[in-house]
Amino acid sequence: MANEDQTEGKAKDIGGKLKEEAGDLMSDEGLKREGQAEQAEGKLQQGLGDLKEKLKEAFKD
């Protein structure tokens, strides 16, 4: 089961990919970079969520 950070991070990553593609299609470098930044933020948040799950599992007992 995914935690909130994993879910929100994945959503940001997907939204960022869509923005990057839209920027590509419209030749809008600003939108493209914004999408790339959102993807990076999403991946970072997903990683934080993964770490939380690993810590929760490690201290489960």
Image (cartoon, rainbow, N blue to C red):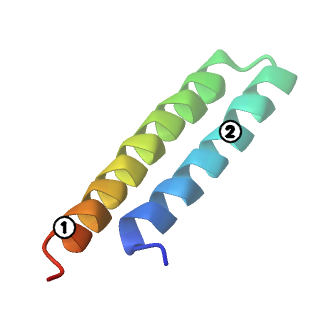
Q: Which mark is residue 58?
A: 1
Going by the image, does 54 lie left or right of 21?
A: left
Rendered image quadrant of residue 28: top right
Residue underneath mark 2: 17
Q: Residue at coordinates 36% horizontally, 51% vertically from top-left?
A: 45
- Nearest to the observer: residue 56 or residue 32: 56
- Residue nearest the observer in this picture, 37 or 23: 37
* Quarter that holds the C terminus: bottom left
Type of amino acid under label 1: Ala
Query: Above or below — where is 52 with respect to 56?
Result: above
Q: Residues within 10 Å of mark 2 (few under 14, many from 20)?
A: some
Residue shown at 53%/38% (left/top)?
39
Is residue 28 visible in this depiction of the protein? yes
Question: x, y percentage for residue 60?
Answer: 18, 80
Q: Quadrant of residue 51?
A: bottom left
Above or below 34: residue 60:
below
Could you tell me how far apart the alpha carbons at marks 2 and 1 are, in whole angstroms? Answer: 33 Å
